[in-house]
Image (cartoon, grey):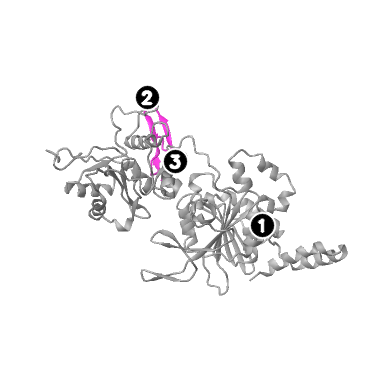
Amino acid sequence: METSVSKIVQLSEVLNYLTPEEREQAQEILRQCLPKWSPLVGPQLEAYESPADILYFGGSAGGAKSDFVLGLALNEHRRSIIFRREATQTVALVDRLAEILGTREGFNAQHLIWRFPGRQIEFGSCPHPGDELRFQGRPHDLLAFDEICHFLEIQFRFLSTWNRTTVQGQRCRIVCTGNPPTTEEGRWVIQYWAPWLDDKHPNPAKPGELRWFSTIDGKDVEFPTGKPVKHKGEIIIPRSRTFIPSRVTDNPFLMATDYKKVLEALPEPLRSQMLHGDFQAGMEDSDLQVVPTTWVDAAMARWSEHGKTGQMDSVGVDVARGGRDKTVIAIRYGNWYAPLITYPGTATPDGAITSSYIIAVRRDYAPIHVDAISVGGSVIDHLKSNGIHVVPIVGSGEADLGVTDKATGLLRFVNKRSQIWWQFRESLDPKIGDNMALPPDPELRADLCAPMWTLTTRGILIESKEDRVTETGAKVSGIKSRLGRSPDKGEAVVYCSINTPKIHPSSRNWRDRMPKTTWRSA
């Protein structure tokens, strides 16, 4: 059903067909009827009227996206919150709302809340992982994320939990705006709205088309309709999603300026991203990214489900440390990696159970490489006590003596973690690599492209998973802080890439040849 606002906006389009005198009289009547803000005819009005529970209104810069969420909060919702990743970024939103209203009356600058009779608009931010917890238990019928690609996926999903109301008849919805992601950390947005944004999606959706999804066992599952479904005794109600593209050409106010020329002058791929809203335009890797994105993409493009040949050569395991972490088992046959096997941390509560999962899939006496720190130690002990060839991986331990990088033959490694990650990089190198084939997996792609490296006086140092404190007392963020989760899949695959000679149980003194478990602090 159309809102009164949209009807008035559409009526204003008829003014072009009136005489000057009639137009002046009609404009005066419309000025008295129109609210402080009304949507532009075109994509903005389409987004305004969209029935989607979760809407992404985005694409190019200058598409009047921020105005859109402010207008929704003003006209359609009682209790709204508009997020930007950094608190300083909300200043422009507050200033724009003051411009629309013509006053700052009702605004509490200390708490960043604007109160009106019958409604409230709050401005929030989540600059660091975990900041989303500050908003736990605070329901809003409108949750808006301005520049969604700047947010971590876990932040978005957690905050979305509180999109609800107790007011009968009040609609609840989540609205996201933004340009295409320019970093690997923002690519989760393409996967979340894959039917619209991923050009490889098997069942693409049209702009504005509704699709229904729900999270089942930790994965998004698409349903044909929004009708309730039963899963494991629980009733699940899928929520609708859609994407509506915005362009600077849809904004007559900016088109009257030179802003379009500014976008046209940008270098590629930024020009395609900001001017055309191209979500497939390439992103620039950091010079310090360990594994180039194009190498990972090439390895995934080589993969086929029938590519397995020969015997199983290696198993890599990253054991869950609790919380949102996953236990991941990676398996390799020569240069072909099998689809990853994952278990939620709750399904692998101890070493015995985790070991049973590993033993069930291991074949051909393949050595099993397990992170030895923390909970991995129990898994190693259980495997070893059962005569299974297990190789403990101590990332903070010393690199192999005399091992250097292949490209120069001069660079050594600060620790074992740096060595195995760099050697995995070399296995993907199109010039000196082994034509590795990786299973297509967006989360694995993000994990492998996340780590950064630096060159120290001791050699190559790969970024750690956890935050760490330097000798000078400075805090250095790890991969988990940037991704908002542990890179479990990437770690398992890197462990699996290690070439360890097999030990056949029939060989003499095979137990003595088993690697000795060594323990070091992380």
Q: Is residue 387 visible?
A: yes
Give the image location of residue 368, x and y in percent: 26, 44
Q: Amino acid at mark 1?
A: Leu
Residue closest to the far right: 21
Q: Amino acid at mark 2?
A: Leu
Residue named by callout 2: 410
Does label 3 or label 2 sit earlier along the sequence? Answer: 3
Which residue is pictured at 62% across the width and 51% down the height?
91
Residue named by callout 1: 97
Mark whose residue sits in front, 1 or 2: 2
Mark whose residue sits in front, 1 or 3: 3
Q: Amino acid at mark 3?
A: Ala
Quadrant in which residue 311 is drawn: top left
Q: CA distance from mark 1 to mark 3?
A: 46 Å
Does dot 1 land on a helix, a strand or a loop? helix
Q: Is residue 463 magenta?
A: yes
Give the image location of residue 405, x and y in percent: 37, 29
Residue closest to the far left: 508
Which residue is pictured at 29% across the width and 56% down the height?
348
Q: CA distance from mark 1 to mark 2?
A: 58 Å
Circle number at residue 298? 3
Does dot 2 land on a helix, a strand or a loop? loop
Give the image location of residue 206, x and y in percent: 57, 58
Left or right side of 35 for 223: left
Give the image location of residue 37, x and y in percent: 69, 61
Q: CA distance from mark 3 to mark 2?
A: 27 Å
Quadrant in which residue 77 is drawn: bottom right
- Residue 188's place in the image compared with 434, above or below, is below
Mark whose residue sits in front, 3 or 2: 3
Task: Give the magenta-colored segment's residue range.
Answer: 450-479
